[in-house]
Image: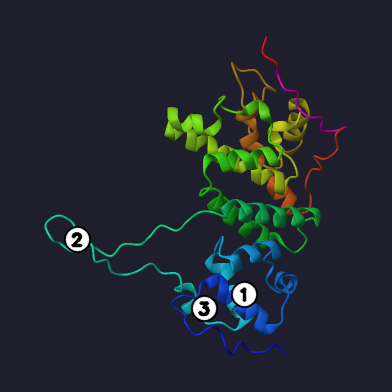
Amino acid sequence: MVKQVRDLPENDAIVTMGAKLRAARDELGFSRAKVQEETGIPAKTLEHYEAGSSEPTLTRLKALCDLYKLPFGEMAGAEEAPKESSKEPVGGTPIEEQSVPKEVDGELPVVEALLEELAAFRVAGFDGSQRRAMALVSELNATMKRLESDELEALAETRGLFEGDRPTADGIFGLFVEDVDEAQRFCGLVEERIIDTAILGADLYAIDREALITVADDIKDEFNIEEPRYLGWSDCWGDYAEFVPLIREPLRKLALMGKGVDFADPGQFPARELEVAA
């Protein structure tokens, strides 16, 4: 029988959400591994929540509140910003209620934990975990948007993204100096490729083109993919940027169906060679 949480620290005004979650878990005598088993939230991610370096999404907070028998409404509103300000602008008109932006420190460990959880589902063939995996992808898409360019670039490097696609000598930051829209577009491409490493087990751009074209040919009829054609030529898929987006979602769907392609076989899927400038 699960024990009710009775006594949390009394001064709610200064007790953080993380401290409340830690106190509730300790009161029940649950290990982080036990919480992971009950909710699916990785133990490492829970550690970050309790330390206050990151906060759970509402969905995860609800799962924790249900497990710990905590009031979800109160917990969800526990970190609200001050509602009043004594400052006034020129002219004496009171400033409207403002919220204080929250720090984004700690988002990178959260992203890494989500990627690890998604990869674990892939190893298990996504057996019975399809909806949770899809929810993780949505959460990853949202969380990676809060990473700064240097964090995203560091994550891309640790995930083994093909280094020949780096934009400038100054990295993604250099793109933001030149063109913000282009930088954001490039970041979006990098984010999708990072998610591929968890769902598919590989960065598609890092696989030899001919081997990847073979996969594209194999699935094009099943998913009604129309290959790019140039000057009327057939069997011309173009470069990575042109055909990878066409096959990405079908390949992810196959993975979720337990029919994913094993890109880990170097004999069938050799690595793409880095082109050396003449």
Q: Position of residue 206 (x, y in %)?
A: 72, 32
The residue under label 2 is: 88
Between 272 and 34, the residue placed more toward the observer is 34
Q: Is residue 224 visible?
A: no
Real-space CA distance between mark 2 and mark 1, rounded to the nearest whole angstrom = 39 Å
Q: What is the magenta segment's predominant secondary structure?
A: loop
Where residue 17 appears, x then y in whole percent?
53, 72
The kind of residue tagged 3 is Phe
Whether the residues at callouts 3 and 2 have beta carbons within 8 Å, the answer is: no
Which marked residue is nearer to the observer: mark 1 or mark 3?
A: 1
Q: Is 214 left, or right, of 18 in this rendering? A: right
Q: Quadrant of the N terminus?
A: bottom right
Element under label 2? Answer: loop
Give residue 178's quadrant in the image: top left
Circle nearer the N terminus (1, 3): 1
Magenta-drawn segment: 267-275
- Could you say which quadrant of the image residue 94 lies in? bottom left
Q: Which residue is mark 3?
A: 72
In screen coordinates, is 269 left or right of 85? right
Taking 89 as reference, is 276 left or right?
right
What kind of residue is marked 2? Answer: Glu
Q: Which residue is mark 1?
A: 22
- For this orientation, the residue located farthest to the right is 267
